[in-house]
Image (spheres, rainbow, N blue to C red):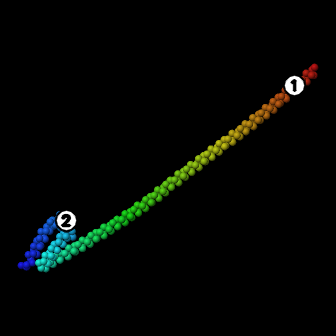
Amino acid sequence: MDIHTIPRTYVSAYLSIARLPLDVAARVTNHATDGAWAPALAFDEFAANVRQIVGALTGDQTLEQQGRAGQARVAEYRDALHLRVAAEQTEAEAEDTARARRSASERRRREAAERVEERRANADRLEEQAKIAADAQAATRAEQARQAQADRKKAATAARRSARTREISKERAAVGRAKAAGDAQAAARTTGKKIQATKAQRRSA
């Protein structure tokens, strides 16, 4: 039996026993097959250091080689972990950038839609105001036309009344003149009769 076999066996047994709680925790947390799990990496690094130190002290090159191989494996896992973390970080940053761009694009679309809606509302309001103004102008013109027609009717009525008044005045004047003429004729006849009566009295005397 190789004299280095016993220390190597003890080291392997010790490390296996020491790892048992970690293996249980790995199974419970679903990290049993995750070689890059941080606690497992820490223990593997510890185990590699133990093998390398014990191998160097005992002159067991195999154990020492196992320790160096374990350290290399841990370094590879750590590099892979760093790369994965960096990739996840890059992906997260890319997602954040894409999310920010989508948010900005959505905000621009929303603002554009709001501007279009505002312009449409302004156009509708201006159209409504123009309609109200047109209706008011039409109502004003209609009222003016009605008032003008009423004024014309009133003027025509006043003209007819004035003409009728002038006609009545003329008729009254004519009646007056006729009456005056009749009175004058009656007076003349009366005077003539008196003169004749006087003459008759003088002849009979």
Q: Which numbered marker is on residue 30?
A: 2
Q: Which numbered marker is on residue 91?
A: none
Q: Is residue 34 left or right of residue 117?
A: left
Type of the residue with mark 2:
Asn
Camera-side residue of 43 and 134: 43
Q: Is residue 13 left or right of residue 151?
A: left
* Quadrant hosting residue 147: top right
Q: Secondary structure at mark 2?
A: loop
Q: Residue 150, relative to residue 1: is it above or below?
A: above
Type of the residue with mark 1:
Lys
Instruction: Work out which quarter of the rendered image holds the N terminus and state it.
Output: bottom left
Q: Residue 25, position in %: x, y?
A: 17, 65
Q: Residue 44, position in %: x, y?
A: 17, 72
Q: Residue 114, position in %: x, y?
A: 43, 59
Q: Residue 146, position in %: x, y?
A: 60, 46
Camera-side residue of 159 and 122: 122
Camera-side residue of 151 and 22: 22
Residue at the extreme top of the image, as rendered: 205
User: Which residue is depicted at the point 53% across and 54% down?
Assistant: 130
Q: Is residue 57 left or right of residue 180?
A: left
Q: Nearer the viewer, mark 2 or mark 1?
A: 2
User: Which residue is depicted at the point 21% across and 74% down?
Assistant: 75
Residue 148 seen in the figure: yes
